[in-house]
Image (tube, rainbow, N blue to C red):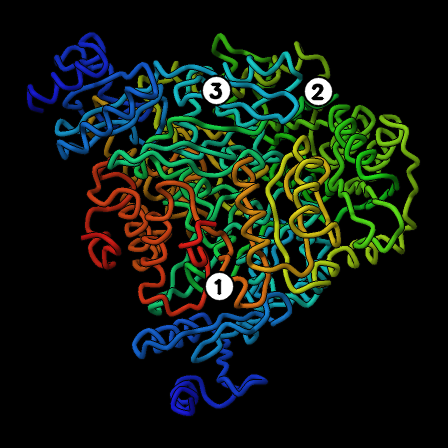
Amino acid sequence: MSAVLARLRALLGTAGVERDADGLPRATPDTTDGVAEVCRLAYEEGWKVRLEGQGTWLPADAPADLALSTRGLDQVVSVSPADLVATVQAGAPLEAVRRRLANDGMWLAIDPPGRPERSIGSLVATATSGPLRLGFGPVRDHILGCAVATGDGRVVRAGGRVVKNVAGYDLTKLQVGGFGGFGVITELNVRLRALPRADATHTARGTRDALTSAARDLTAAGVAPAALELLSPALAAESDWILAARFTGTDVAVHAGVRTLSAANDLAWHALPVDRTAAFWGLTARAALGGPVTIRLGVLADGLDDTLDLVAHHLDEGLISAGAAGGMLRWTGDATVDHLRALRRTTATREIPMTVERAPWPVRHATGHFGAYREGVAILVNRLRDTFDPRENFRVALEGEVADGA
Amino acid sequence: MTPALVAELGRIVGPRWVRHRRAELATFAMDGLPTRESYPGVVVLPGTRGELIAIVRALAAARVPFVARGAGTGLSGGAVADSDAVLITLTRLTRILSIDPVRRRAVLEPGVVNARLSDAVLPFGLAYVPDPSSQTACTVGGNVAENAGGPHCLKYGVTTNHVVALEVVLPEGDVVRLGSHAGEPWGPDLVGLFVGSEGMFGIATEITVRLEPIPASVRTLLADFASVRQAGEAVSAIIASGIVPAALEMMDRACVAAVEASIYAAGYPTDAAAVLLVEVDGERDAVDGEAAAVETILRSHGARDVRSAATAFDRARLWQGRKKAFGAMGRIAPDLAVQDAVVPRSALPRVLEQIGEISDRYQLTVSNVFHAGDGNLHPNISFDRRDHELAGRVHDASREIMEVCVAAGGTITGEHGVGSDKRDYMPLVFDAATLQAMCAVRHVFDPYTRANPSKVFPQHTCREWRAAGVA
């Protein structure tokens, strides 16, 4: 262990290496090249590497010879309001990015689960979108390009800084939601939007079935909020299920949206006071840390009731946040490997993919973030993995223990 | 091409759907790029998914390269094949397999024409949003291969944002299903990786797309300016206001003149240096308010006149000139080099001046029509390809235009693809390691590089990266 520490110090200097709580050497390079050099060294020495950001999302528990953290890469490199694009280092905490962008009247329209100090790199590597996915798309839609250090220490610069770009293959898509299996993201070019002039959230309460049914009616009536999120009683800390509709944009657009909301159904909607809106959505995001395991399921609105039943049956009806107009359901709680596998087997037959977003290493090592792939896909993913991390230095469990078939 | 292979293809699709005489191949020797002509060895037109898969498997067994082609409207020379390759034309695979208005999804074969899909979902109050100018001819399969854009991609995104799932036959003949109806990847985002791979990762046999509700209200505004710079500044001001128009298009004087002199005349003011088309959509009240705000911005940035259209008929008239601009330019000269590049929006006025300087220096006629909202330029050079000296100047000027766009922080193509036209510009935007990584990813899907060979990458780039996982 001390040999690893000494080699890393020789490479990065004493300021670039520390020990984590368990005494494991943790490299914190502050440049993309520095990250690549650490990867190269680990590749040559055969060391296993645990990837970390700010350490607030995935537990730092993958067994490894060293940890490689992006927390030294915490700068907002540039913000171009006129071009609606920013370049941000991967370890930058989201809250710091948010504040910096707001200074320029800009906004990154992603509201991921977890803590505000979560690194932007972790958000992208895990593709953990939040309720705003409905109005602004999943994480992939916001990322214009990225720099990545591969397992053998090369630097690949995918995409660019413009909103339309079809030069070459879209390698950025592989990194978004790749959980680090295809490299360490060191820098990101993100698509910005003008900070909305108006931002209104309305909530209604009721039984689960009443709210999912109302949500389907809203969608059919053409109501198009930026978010329409169904929150379980435990997650909302309320006695009932909550349906929260968020409208963002110009004043006229938000007022028009709110009017359609009340006109389209007979739920009793309550406007959230403006000063409580950020806190409401912040609490919703943090609720995903309320248990050791977080999963997401890709589910459409017409399959939501059935999927909620499945989750309740195999896991529990605890901390759930779901796009009521379709897209994604997120569950957080405590779950065994067997229960997760059973749920994944069941949802797979319904064409619903299940991703383990967050879990202690023994669980995610067994289940994998993705589990078994569909026919013919495993060979592609394994070759991609072999391309970007040829000796599997990165301790990332994409597929899990496949022998169990889930 | 061996007679045995031609016979084998004939057994799969029926002899009438295999073309191998030179006269028959002429139709397939070019796509929308006028400077690249190449006769394929054989053309085969499968009529079913099963035939398509059987063809790919037969070619895998025979180790013969192939090129997939839709309507052949691509502008980068991506859908042409050399004589040692089979051109698989997908225009018979035109079935829309399902439309689910509640889920807002459609499943279709790759040969479905873009506009036909939108027509088919219109009765449900839905639209397939990506709308390339060639939408009345181009196929969705081709859109997937190129990650096609269009004017309405400013607000709604390009093809990759609308494709949720694919069934793909890989070059070695395996069939895989990628993505899910909900749009959530199944494992890594291989749908995202496949879209825009220019036919080099395999052929999409089934495409599942997201449909969008048709907005309750749409307003189109047309403003004309005395200078391109003023128009460019108006674009920036609209974006900065927080309004996201559904489309924001600009045409310069040369383009307007060409349109107005053609049968597509839309009543654009021919003395304007630049014309802006702005479309806002959404709830009726919101559209009224945002259209008023846009008009104020346009006028305060020097618009001489602002016309507004709310009815479908009037909007179509304002749009006609823009959608048919490429056709209108056909009157000026026999050939048109439709260029495609992207620059940061803020660099638009400066880059347009540089393009004007380049076209003057090479004594070329360049008209600009472009998606101003996202900085996607289309400088179009009129020429006659039979004039080799002129064609040489077009080539050199095109390269300089690309260099200017890249130097401004942009890229060499925003929606037309690299194909065979822009291979040599790839090192302008990507370093060696990144190009090699792309080549390595191509090997993942196509270990023997038989799918659309010798496109996208300059020949020498693909040697270095260890061909991972490939014997």
Q: Residue at x 42, y 68 (%)?
A: A394
Q: Which mark is residue B114?
A: 3
Badge 1 crowding class, 10 Å Cα cut-off, few under 14, some 14 to 19, many 20 or more, is many
At mark 3, the secondary structure is: helix
Q: Position of residue B376 (x, y in %)?
A: 50, 38
Amino acid type, residue under disc 1 in the picture: His
- Does residue A311 sit above or below B176 in this rendering? below
Q: Residues within 10 Å of mark 2 (few under 14, many from 20)?
A: few
Instruction: Give the distance between the C-alpha atoms of the residues marked 3 and 2, in whole angstroms.
Output: 29 Å
Q: Earlier in the sequence, mark 3 or mark 2?
A: 3
The quarter of the picture where residue B349 lies is top right
Q: Nearer the viewer, residue A101 or A174?
A: A174
**Are dots 3 and 2 on a single chain?**
yes
The residue singled out by tag 2 in the image is: B307
Disc 2 to disc 1, C-alpha distance: 62 Å
Chain letter of mark 3 equals: B
C-alpha separation, residue under disc 3 versus residue under disc 1 = 44 Å
- Whether residue A198 is visible, yes or no, is yes
Say which chain tag 2 marks. Answer: B
Do callouts 3 and 2 mark residues in contact (Cβ within 8 Å)? Answer: no
* In front of the other: B85 or A270: A270
Please tell me in which quadrant of the rendered image residue A257 appears: top right
